[in-house]
Amino acid sequence: MKQLIFRSMYLQKSSIKWIIGYLVFAFLVVDEFISNNGLFFIIIPSMTYISYFISEQLENIYKTGTILNSMPVDRKSVVINKYLSIFILYFMNLFIGIAIFYIFKILNIISYNLENVSNGIIVSLSISIIIAGIGIPSILKFNAWLSKIINVLAFVIIMNIIIPIKNIIGLNALENKSRIFLIISVLIYISSFVLSLKIYKNKEF
């Protein structure tokens, strides 16, 4: 299990430059991304999506699934690794996002403030695991081309739902509902894991 997690983190080296580039673009160019606590609603979930999406594309290129299937690695461990890796990627991107936000803030490049950070973390984690919960089973079930389409569509649809919530309701208004949102997202994630486990155990390479 440790080796699988280390392998996933090693693949993230290729995504770091894209994540930082996305952050700079979001902070400097797209006001919609950063206003009204957009760091939690949009940027960090997007960074997590970019990280795992690039990782999965690299695994397709290197045919990691076929290689792992030829090794004495339990298929359940492979699926668990994918789902645990999302949390590692999330907290990595959370740290990078907040750090760069405050660097830009100190340099007076942006004028926005982060409000209700603990609630923001709950909301951004919930959004991130919902996106991943939809995307991972499609990656395991379908070919690379179709899974890309499903992942992109899921991301775009969820973001188009989240942006109006960010602008109309806001983070503070969600304070009493964020934990309910987290519970729902965790239930979706667990259901996704069970489905992925069933798909991967029966998958032929």
Image (cartoon, rainbow, N blue to C red):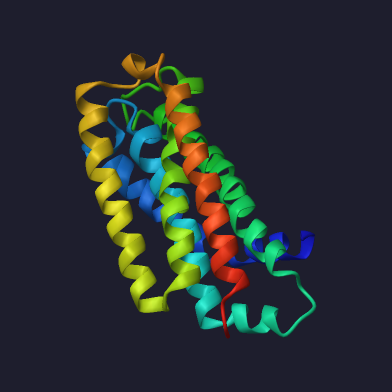
Q: Residue at x 64, y 51 (%)?
A: 84
- Locate residue 11, reporting x and y percent: 60, 67
Q: Write down the quadrant of residue 29 in the picture.
A: top left
Q: Write down the quadrant of residue 87 in the picture.
A: top right
- Locate residue 77, reporting x and y percent: 71, 62
Of residues 15 and 110, the one drawn nearer to the viewer in this rendering = 15
Q: Residue at x 35, y 28 (%)?
A: 108
Q: Write down the quadrant of residue 203 in the picture.
A: bottom right
Quadrant of the rendering where the N terminus is positioned: bottom right
- Locate residue 101, reporting x and y percent: 43, 34
Of residues 158 and 38, the one drawn nearer to the viewer in this rendering = 158
Quadrant of the rendering where the C terminus is positioned: bottom right
Q: Is residue 183 above or below residue 13?
A: above
Q: Is residue 35 above or below residue 25?
A: above
Q: Is residue 204 left or right of residue 111?
A: right
- Locate residue 20, reporting x and y percent: 44, 52
Is residue 177 among what the camera can see?
yes
Q: Residue at x 21, y 27 (%)?
A: 167
Is residue 12 among what the camera can see?
no
Q: Is residue 9 left or right of residue 33?
A: right
Q: Is residue 58 left or right of residue 147?
A: right
Of residues 2 and 35, the one drawn nearer to the viewer in this rendering = 2
Q: Is residue 156 left or right of residue 198?
A: left
Q: Residue at x 35, y 19 (%)?
A: 174
